[in-house]
Each structure stands twice: as C-alpha cells, then as structure tokens.
Image: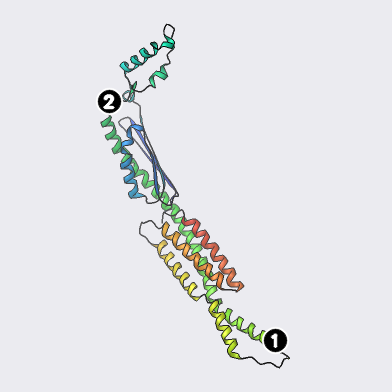
C-alpha cells in the first residue's frame, strides 16, 4: 500500500553544470502532472511525463527542474545588429527628434532578439535530456519510498478500523436472534395484561403470525453476511503484496460497507444493535477519509 503524498529530489554536477530536479505529490482522484523546466528544455517535458506515468498512477504530481552553469559559456550573446536597429528607431521617432534621448540598457536587452542563448542548443538539450531523465528516476525512487512508508502507517490505521467493524458486527450477529425472542415475550406479556380480568380469548396463530412478520421486518442476517464479505475483501486488498493502485477499489468498497451498515440500522429497532451500528458507521467514515490518500 502506498500513500499519494510524497517528496523526492536528486541533483548532480556534470562538467561544471549543476542539475537539480524535485518531485512532489499530493492527493488526487486521478493522475495530474505539472512539469516546470527551464524554457529551453520544455521539449523534454512530454518524455518526462510519459516516464512518470509508468511509476505513479494517481495524485497531483509537481516536477521542478533547474540547470545552473557557472562557466562563461553560459552567458547569452548580444545581437549587436538588432540592438543598433532598436536604438536607431528610437532616435528617429518624431516625438524625440532633435532632443536628447535617454536609453535604458536593461530595457534594451529585454527587447526581442537582442539577447540570444549560447550556440549549439541541440547539444545542450541532448545533454540535459539524459541528465534530467536520470534525476527523475532517482527522485521517483525517493518519492515512492516515502509513499510506501506513509502507506504502511495508513494500512495499520485501516487494519485497526477494520477490526472495530468486525468486532461490533460479531456482537450484532450474536444479539440479533435475541431481539425476536424478546419481542415475542413482550407481545405475550402485553396480551396477557390486556386479557387479565376479561372474559376474552385469542388465537395463538395470530400471535405466531405477528411474530413471524416482525422477524421478517427486522431480519438483518443477509446484511450482516454481506458486510462480513466486504470485510474479508477489504482484508485481501490491503494485504495484497502486489505493487498496484488500490485506492479507488477501497473507496468503492467502503461505500458498499456503509450501505449495509445503514440498512442494518434502519431494520433493527434494538438499542444495543443501534449503538454498535453507529460505531461501525463511524469507523467506516474514517476509512473513507483515509483511503482518499491511498494510491
């Protein structure tokens, strides 16, 4: 079992160039990735996303990468022809013709085409691609390890909640037959009380029919059996050693468990069963919250 919350990072120094990449993940019902690389390397973002999808199936994934070069070759080159052309156009503008013109160097350098990246962009992209993909694998290993650690903590919590549900369900199953017997006793006592001192007779078959009708209305054996089946399936899923997404399955299963618990609560008038059912529903609600963070 893996959580959807995690963090991993990796960095390397190659030929005087520092590469860094981090991966963060948060809860999401589906897979959603946001990749942020320097503009010159956006061409490899699709390949990074494809590789990431093989490692992570759910969650909001944010990837941030950077490349820092300390050598002089990292400097952008000034296109002097473009710069001179901009200056010439400013001086020829009618509003400033014949007057002094103040030129801001920073603004001029920000104009399109003035600053140009170092030559051999294809080589830079090729080198960065290999490094970033390597860093992605390393960062994902760290992120998955964190997800597994948090997933184990989630599993322990889910096991505890499952045990609460199973224990309360056993109490309900043991209590259910006594509910009909007690109703029969109360019905017999009420009839005897009404007939006391009166010269009246009643047919036992009517009492039997009423008891049978009550037993049918309050029978929860089928719901108890189905809820036990859901608990068994829940156990199989969280104990499965295969590395596969299980969050959506657990979410659906918890909804089915809650459906059976609600039916038990609506059919049984017994106060003890009602109290235990409330505790079961509380545990199921906590399961529903927890599985939202399971991949």
Q: Residue at coordinates 69% horizontally, 89% vertically from top-left?
A: 195
**Residue underneath mark 1:** 194
Check the picture and name the quadrant holding the C terminus: bottom left
Classify residue 280 as left or right of residue 102: right
**Residue underneath mark 2:** 119
Q: Residue 43 carries which label?
A: none
Task: Check contact, mark 1 vs mark 2: CB within 8 A.
Answer: no
Q: Percent position (x, y) of residue 216? A: 53, 79
Q: Against 22, is 257 above or below? A: below
Quick one: label 1, few (<14), some, or many (20+) residues within 10 Å?
A: few
Q: Against 206, is 74 above or below? A: above
Q: Residue at coordinates 47% horizontally, 65% vertically from top-left?
A: 256
- Judging depth in this view, the residue of 23 and 200 nearest the camera is 200
Mark 1–mark 2 distance (CA, rounded to whole Å)? 105 Å
Quick one: label 2, few (<14), some, or many (20+) residues within 10 Å?
A: few
Q: Percent position (x, y) of residue 6? A: 43, 47
Classify residue 142 as left or right of residue 201: left
Outermost residue to the right:
197
Q: Percent position (x, y) of residue 176? A: 55, 77
Check the picture and name the quadrant holding the N terminus: bottom left
């Amino acid at each position: 079992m893996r959580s959807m919350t995690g963090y991993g990072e990796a960095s390397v120094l190659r030929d005087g160039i520092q590469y860094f990449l981090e991966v963060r993940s948060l809860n999401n019902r589906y897979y959603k990735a946001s990749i942020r690389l320097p503009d010159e390397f956006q061409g490899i973002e699709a390949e990074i996303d494809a590789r990431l999808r093989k490692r992570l199936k759910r969650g909001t994934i944010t990837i941030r990468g950077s490349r820092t070069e300390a050598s002089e070759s990292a400097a952008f080159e000034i296109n002097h022809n473009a710069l001179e052309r901009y200056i010439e156009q400013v001086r020829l503008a009618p509003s400033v013709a014949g007057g002094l013109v103040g030129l801001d160097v920073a603004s001029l350098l920000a104009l399109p085409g003035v600053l140009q990246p170092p030559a051999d962009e294809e080589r830079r992209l090729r080198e960065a691609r290999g490094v970033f993909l390597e860093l992605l694998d390393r960062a994902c290993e760290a992120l998955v390890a964190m997800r597994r650690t948090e997933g184990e903590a989630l599993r322990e919590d889910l096991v505890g909640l499952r045990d609460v549900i199973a224990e309360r369900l056993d109490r309900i199953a043991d209590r259910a037959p006594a509910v009909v017997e007690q109703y029969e006793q109360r019905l017999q006592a009420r009839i005897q009380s009404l007939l006391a001192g009166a010269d009246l007779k009643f047919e036992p078959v009517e009492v039997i029919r009423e008891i049978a009708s009550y037993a049918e209305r309050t029978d929860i054996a089928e719901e108890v059996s189905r809820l036990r089946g859901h608990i068994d399936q829940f156990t199989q899923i969280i104990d499965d050693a295969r590395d596969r997404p299980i969050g959506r399955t657990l979410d659906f299963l918890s909804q089915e468990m809650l459906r059976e618990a609600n039916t038990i609560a609506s059919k049984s008038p017994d106060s003890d069963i009602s109290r235990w059912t409330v505790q079961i529903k509380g545990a199921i609600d906590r399961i529903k919250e927890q599985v939202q963070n399971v991949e």
